[in-house]
Image (cartoon, rainbow, N blue to C red):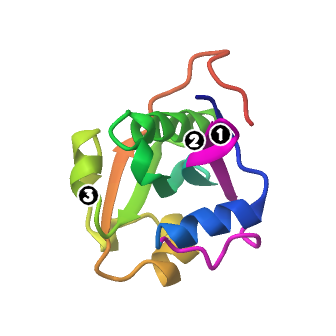
Amino acid sequence: MAIIPALDPDIVRELLQNAQLPSADIGHNPRARFYLIEQAGQPVGLAGLECYGHDALLRSLLVQPAYRGRGLAAQLVDHIQQMAAAQGASALYLLTTDAADYFRRIGFRDIAREAAPPAIRQTEQFSQLCPAAASLLWRPVQPVSAGDYSLR
């Protein structure tokens, strides 16, 4: 299964709404880029990225229930990390209400919300869409070797 850019905001919005993830900014956030994993032409996973200089926000990671346990979430996170590195980010942040343990297992660390960089605090995800009780996690972005990824 290949990871491809999600170019249709209606598909992104529908996937997010079905997974009960924030979707209010879909279609009007010019920094948000989404990527899909498809199986037989149907989306089975999605993740988003917003880059703000050296800081990036991983948002909206989801895998359809029938496809969980196959490593697709990890593939999406790796792809987002590579896209963030290709755009010059050195830190990747995320907010979650229910998946902090998963993200800790793949190398993210907890950080106090007050310690978030200003660019991350100003995102709609941080300031409006995610509840104040959401955990904030981060990890360093691994540099991309020349030719590893193109900006897609």
Residue drawn at x 62%, y 47% is 43
Residue with the mark numbered 2: 84
Residue drawn at x 35%, y 44% is 139
Residue with the mark numbered 3: 100
Residue with the mark numbered 1: 87
Query: Is-magenta flag for residue 25?
Result: yes
Query: Is-magenta flag for residue 20?
Result: no
Q: How far apart are marks 2 and 3 (CA)?
A: 20 Å
First in sequence, mark 1 or 3: give its number: 1
Vertical order, 100 against 148 (above or below): below
Q: Looking at the image, is mark 1 or mark 3 nearer the viewer?
A: 3
Q: Where is residue 2 in the image (x, y as percent from the top left)?
A: 62, 29
- For mark 3, give the secondary structure: helix
Q: Can residue 30 be seen in this view?
A: no
Q: Identify the image quadrant of residue 98.
A: bottom left
- For mark 2, give the secondary structure: helix
